[in-house]
Image: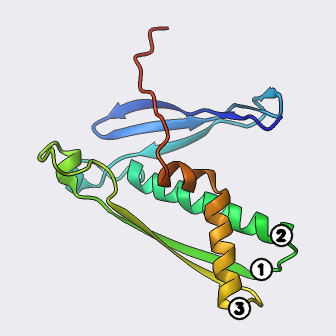
Amino acid sequence: MALFKFRAANQWVGGTHNQATIRDFYGAGAEDDTRKPMVFDLDEPPVLLGDNRGANPVEYLLVALSGCLTTSLVAHAAARGIALRGVKSRYEGDIDLRGFLGLSEEVPAGYREIRVFFSIDADLTDEQKEELIRMAQKYSPVYNTVAKPVPVSVLLDRG
């Protein structure tokens, strides 16, 4: 019952613009296709040869991380009976584009570092707020996927 399989599909539109679609998933022992498709436009800013038709993929990674850490934090706070008035966070990451552009084999193609800053409005001490942040890290699937190596297979679809 606890095993889930989430899916996304992507199609190139033109230039650096492409669209990802989310709809169905497998979970709780069954296929779930009850949601309407959700379409996400991805593009690059003009400085990276795009037309700003959407956030770029590395920005979507920050968005995914933000949603998952926040969801984990508030869910585990609620499970412990902790009343939150508000939770805000901001995310920033450093990328040297020489890796992405293939200009240097010594430069990684991805983020070198990601920094997350939480602001929690609750009747808690700073130590208790930091414990909530640690719980968010411990239980966030996106955080753990980004922070720890996970196998990723990239294959030609022959079907």
> Could you say where residue 89 lies in the image, as x and y percent from the top left?
56, 74
Q: Nearer the viewer, residue 82 or 34?
A: 82
**Are the residues flagged by discs 2 and 3 in contact, CB closer than 8 Å?**
no
> Residue visible at 42% across and 56% down?
59
Rendered image quadrant of residue 75: bottom right
Q: Residue furthest left?
A: 103
> Could you say where residue 32 lies in the image, as x and y percent from the top left?
77, 30
> What residue sits right under mark 2 in the picture?
78
Q: CA distance from mark 2 to mark 3?
A: 17 Å
| Residues packed near mark 2 inside 10 Å, few (<14), some (14 to 19) or many (20 plus) | few
> What residue sits right under mark 1 in the picture?
84
Q: Is residue 24 above or below residue 109?
A: above
Instruction: Tell whether 133 sits left or right of 92.
Output: right
Q: Is residue 62 above or below residue 156?
A: below
Q: Nearer the viewer, residue 50 or 25?
A: 25
Q: Is residue 56 above or below residue 3?
A: below
> What residue sits right under mark 3 in the picture?
125
Looking at the picture, which amino acid does disc 2 mark?
A: Ala
Instruction: Tell whether 96 sits left or right of 67.
Output: left
> Could you say where residue 121 lies in the image, as x and y percent from the top left?
70, 86
**Are the residues flagged by discs 2 and 1 in contact, CB closer than 8 Å?**
yes
Quick one: label 2 or label 3, which is nearer the N terminus? 2
**Are the residues flagged by discs 3 and 1 in contact, CB closer than 8 Å?**
no
Give SS at disc 1: loop
Q: CA distance from mark 2 to mark 1?
A: 8 Å
> Could you say where residue 71 lies in the image, as x and y percent from the top left?
69, 61
Q: CA distance from mark 3 to mark 1?
A: 13 Å
Looking at the picture, which amino acid does disc 1 mark?
A: Leu
> Residue visible at 47% across and 59% down?
62
Q: Nearer the viewer, residue 131 or 93?
A: 131
